Image: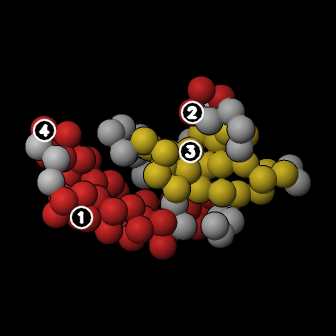
Amino acid sequence: MPSFTRAQAEALLPKVRPLLEDLQRRKAAYDRRPTDPVAKEINALLLEIAHLGAEVKDPDSGLIDFRTVRRGREVYLCWKLGEGDRITYWHDMETGFAGRKLIED
């Protein structure tokens, strides 16, 4: 996966947001009634998001991460649907969402 600056990751949010919203709708439909065509649509959306460089961590909440380097080590910039146009959290690679910390400008 590529590494992003905060500005680069934020520039992708307008492309990623509608894909995540579509992913949520299709996953909810799949959860109600699983079908192969919907599963293929979900996989296609996951691939499209991955090709942009984002890692989907929780499709239900719209949670994604972007790899970045912070103080010389690889970490994630963490964003989820509803958090606006700025990425305001980061976390260590191994801590996940529970380890989110506010980015201090």
Q: Residue most toward the top?
A: 98
Image quadrant occupied by the N terminus: bottom right
Mark 3 neighbour class, 10 Å CA radius: few under 14, some 14 to 19, many 20 or more: many
Residues 26 and 40: in front is 40
Cα–Cα span, label 2 and label 3: 8 Å
Q: Are marks 2 and 3 in contact (CB under 8 Å)?
A: yes
The reply to whether residue 54 is visible in this rendering is yes
Cα–Cα span, label 4 and label 3: 28 Å
Q: Which residue is mark 1?
A: 41
Residue mark closest to the camera, 2 vs 3? 2
Q: Which residue is mark 3?
A: 78
Query: Which amino acid lies under the numbered mark 2 shown in the image of this protein?
Result: Phe
Mark number for residue 97?
Answer: 2
Residue at left offset 32%, top offset 68%: 44
Counting residues from the start of the chain, the first of labels 1 and 2 encountered is 1
Label 2: which secondary element: helix
Q: Is residue 65 left or right of residue 83?
A: right
Residue at left offset 66%, top offset 57%: 67
Counting residues from the start of the chain, the first of labels 3 and 1 encountered is 1
Cα–Cα span, label 3 and label 1: 25 Å
Residue mark closest to the camera, 1 vs 2? 1
Q: Position of residue 71 (x, y in %)?
A: 86, 50
Q: Which residue is mark 4?
A: 32
Q: Position of residue 39 (x, y in %)?
A: 24, 57
Counting residues from the start of the chain, the first of labels 4 and 1 encountered is 4
Label 3: which secondary element: strand
Residue at left offset 68%, top offset 33%: 95
Counting residues from the start of the chain, the first of labels 4 and 3 encountered is 4
Residue mark closest to the camera, 4 vs 3? 4
Q: Position of residue 34 (x, y in %)?
A: 16, 47
Mark 2 neighbour class, 10 Å CA radius: few under 14, some 14 to 19, many 20 or more: many
